[in-house]
Amino acid sequence: MRKLLLFPLLIVAGALSAQKVEVSASYGAPSVYGAAYSLGSALVNAFFNSNEEEPSSKGVAAVGVMMYSGNMKWRYGVDVTNEFFSTTESVSKQNILAVLPKVDYFWLSKEKFGLYSGVSVGAHFISTTYVGKDKKESKDTSTGFGYNVVPIGVKYGGNLSVFMETNVGMKGIVQGGVSYKF
């Protein structure tokens, strides 16, 4: 039985080692999701005549690990994003963390230049620490569906590259960063 399980694992490990792996780090403007989340909270407060200030997004940081297909047209992997928010009198800390498995397609791929589009689907985790009028803190967390669509991304460079992409979802509306392929 062990030999039966070991053989497919060896085949998968051999196939993975033959592919190019890329790691990336980026930072971007606030996300569409974060902006909608802030707007929704502001509308609820306005409806209930609350004058509490809402936290606003400071931007989205992301790290990713991807693998390329044999023909280098497809890239698949996972992004982990974290959107940071400002503090207010009633909110001492707020962030949205997302884990997003992703697939990108390079529809133009030259030696050092590439254009791509992609999609990610995963989960997000919202963590908020509230400060009451008595200065006691209470924490609220929630989990939900996370997504991201990259209508267009631009990549320039060889093994060490820079990229800029537009996003709708959990990553910054405009996100720029660096990546290293090995």
Image (cartoon, rainbow, N blue to C red):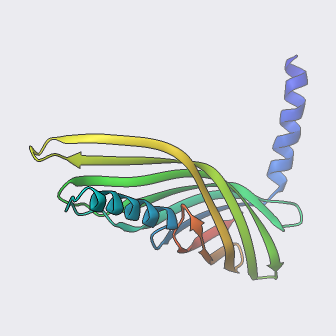
Res 52 quadrant in image: bottom left
How many numbered marks are there? 0
**Residue with the most extreme top position:** 1
In the rendered image of this protein, does residue 98 appear above or below residue 87?
A: above
**Residue with the most extreme left position:** 134
Res 137 quadrant in image: top left
Percent from the top left, x then y, of residue 72?
Answer: 84, 67
Quadrant of image for the N terminus: top right
Task: Please give left or right for residue 62 compared with residue 111 in the image.
Answer: left
The one of 97 and 128 positioned closer to us in this rendering: 128
In the rendered image of this protein, does residue 29 appear above or below residue 135?
A: below
Percent from the top left, x then y, of residue 143?
Answer: 49, 42
In the rendered image of this protein, does residue 104 appear above or below residue 157?
A: above
The one of 87 and 32 positioned closer to us in this rendering: 32
Quadrant of image for the C terminus: bottom right
The one of 69 and 124 positioned closer to us in this rendering: 124
Percent from the top left, x then y, of residue 3?
Answer: 89, 22
Q: Residue at horizontal 38%, vertical 62%?
A: 38
Q: Residue at horizontal 47%, vertical 52%?
A: 97
Q: Residue at horizontal 84%, vertical 60%?
A: 69
Q: Residue at horizontal 16%, vertical 45%?
A: 132
Percent from the top left, x then y, of residue 171?
Answer: 54, 64
Task: Please give left or right for residue 4 compared with residue 36 in the image.
Answer: right
